[in-house]
Amino acid sequence: MVEFKIQMEESVVQTLGYREVEKRLEDFAQKLILKLAAQDILEELPTIDLENDKEWQMARNLAWEQEMHRYIEVPMSPPTFNALEFDTKGFKFDRDEANSR
């Protein structure tokens, strides 16, 4: 690990507090590490061929099988209609009108 000494306006430390300044510097360092890792990945990306990678395809299919229930609602059985359970309250049925059609 490397130690850095930095100079900062005293007013910044007085305004934010020592702990807050320290926390923000640590956050900055972590984000810098992530940026460097992302740059490395982006450089390698053109060389990756996922379409022909069998391990990736198997992993993708397994993930889909495990998680598809979150995206697709599959009915357990087909819906049925039971005329005896049908609630007719609020419906009007006029036989003469039905027969005239």
Image: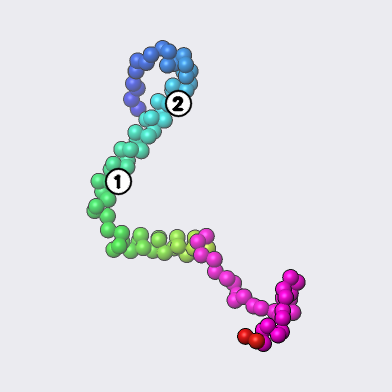
Q: Position of residue 6 (x, y in %)?
A: 34, 18
Relative to 52, 69 lies left or right? right
Q: Which segment did they paint magenta?
A: 70-99
Please report the residue visible at 28 percent of the width from the left and 46 percent of the height from the top.
42
Please report the residue visible at 28 percent of the width from the left and 41 percent of the height from the top.
39
Relative to 50, 100 lies left or right? right
Q: Quadrant of residue 56?
A: bottom left
Distance between the alpha carbons at the discs numbered 1 and 2: 27 Å
- Queried whether the magenta region covers residue 77, the answer comes back as yes
- Residue 41, disc: 1
Relative to 5, 16 lies left or right? right
Q: Amino acid at mark 1?
A: Ile
Helix or strand or loop: what does disc 1 sit on? helix
Q: Quadrant of residue 51?
A: bottom left
Q: Secondary structure of the magenta portion, mostly? A: loop
Local crowd size for mark 2, using a 10 Å CA cut-off: few (<14), some (14–19), many (≥20)? few
Q: 10 above or below 47?
A: above
Q: Position of residue 93 (x, y in %)?
A: 72, 79
To which residue does mark 2 refer?
23
Earlier sequence position, callout 1 versus callout 2: 2
Q: 77 above or below 64?
A: below
- Residue 65, disc: none
